[in-house]
Amino acid sequence: MELDKIEQLLEKYFEGETTLAEEQQLKNYFSSAVVASHLQQYQPLFGYYAVAAQEKPQQEFHLKSNQNQPLKWISIAASVVILLGVGFFAFNHFSAIEKPSSELGTYDDPQQAFEQTQKALAMLSKQVNVGIGSMQYVQQYENTKDQIFITE
Amino acid sequence: MNSNEFLHLITPFKDKVFRLAKRLLVSTEEAEDAAQEVMLKLWNKNQSLSEYQSVEALAMTMTRNYCLDQLKSKRASNLQIVHQNFTNRDPSLQQQLEDADALDWVSKIINNLPEQQKMIVQLRDIEQQEFSEIAKILEMNETAVRVALSRARKTIRENMTKTHSYGIG
């Protein structure tokens, strides 16, 4: 194609007035081996258009939504958390009931239970007697007071 | 419409949708996500699809709206991780880019255009669509499309002559 026609087309091209067919002519010209040296600066431009039109996505389009996937995983995670929570609660709850009975110590033999109870009560009353013992002094004061101030 | 028919329907333009999304969002992964999202929206519209004259134009408009929304929400957040943010403000970076492939350089120039012009260049020069179709997709009138296209092409030319006269490109 004549050079002046190409130049004309280029001028029109930059004004946005070329038709698709004319633009195709330009693309063909710039992809050919013979491009006038002063027009070579436009070669990459038209070359790029051709390359860019070939670009394709790497992954194929699929109809199943990607968004459902996280939701599924979230529901699985949630159910695991709930199960763990219930299990943990049950474990704590039931072992909490069992613990006191084992720690307080129960006796199957009544005789032994009686002895242990006596021992415990004796220990208690001994402590109470210690407290009363220290109150003996107070009683002494009371007696002495009665000797001094004879009341009617 | 069953899924096979739907896949058959979208085959002619699904790559186009991806390319438009990539033009706007720059990153391939984001563009793939966007294309996927648009196709799913189309699939959900399944029943009403027959009401549209051109499913392709509808898909392209949806892509445009979706991508612009994405860009807007990304700009609104503090995290600015859009690729176009590390462009040629820095002269040394520009130098590096110029050393790269000439085609790559063209794509950088196009990606620096305003979004409207980017989309028009994509649809016209790359996808070779008629002005009437572009006008419909972008919801503009044809004259405005022509004016914006001319402006975009001139900006590209300006940037290319600049690099060309520096002996690169």
Image: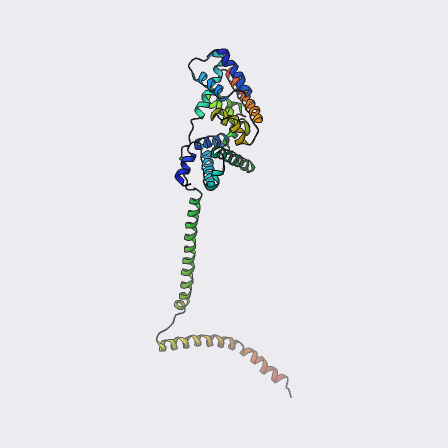
Give the image location of residue B112, x and y in percent: 53, 26
- Farthest residue to the left: give it: A109
Viewer-closest of A29 and A123: A29
Instruction: Tell me the residue at 56%/37% (across/down).
Output: B76
Quarter of the image for residue B4 reads top left
Give the image location of residue A57, x and y in percent: 42, 32
Q: Is residue A113 visible?
A: yes
Q: Is residue B95 above or below residue A151?
A: above
Instruction: Tell me the residue at 43%/55% (across/down).
Output: A82
Marks counted in the figure total 0
Viewer-closest of B58 and B112: B58
Q: Is residue A128 above or below residue A93?
A: below
Instruction: Tell me the residue at 49%/24% (across/down).
Output: B125
Give the image location of residue A104, x and y in percent: 41, 69
Q: Quadrant of the N terminus of chain B?
A: top left
Give the image location of residue B149, x and y in percent: 54, 24
Viewer-closest of B151 and B124: B124
Q: Is residue B80 visible?
A: no
Quarter of the image for residue A17 reads top right
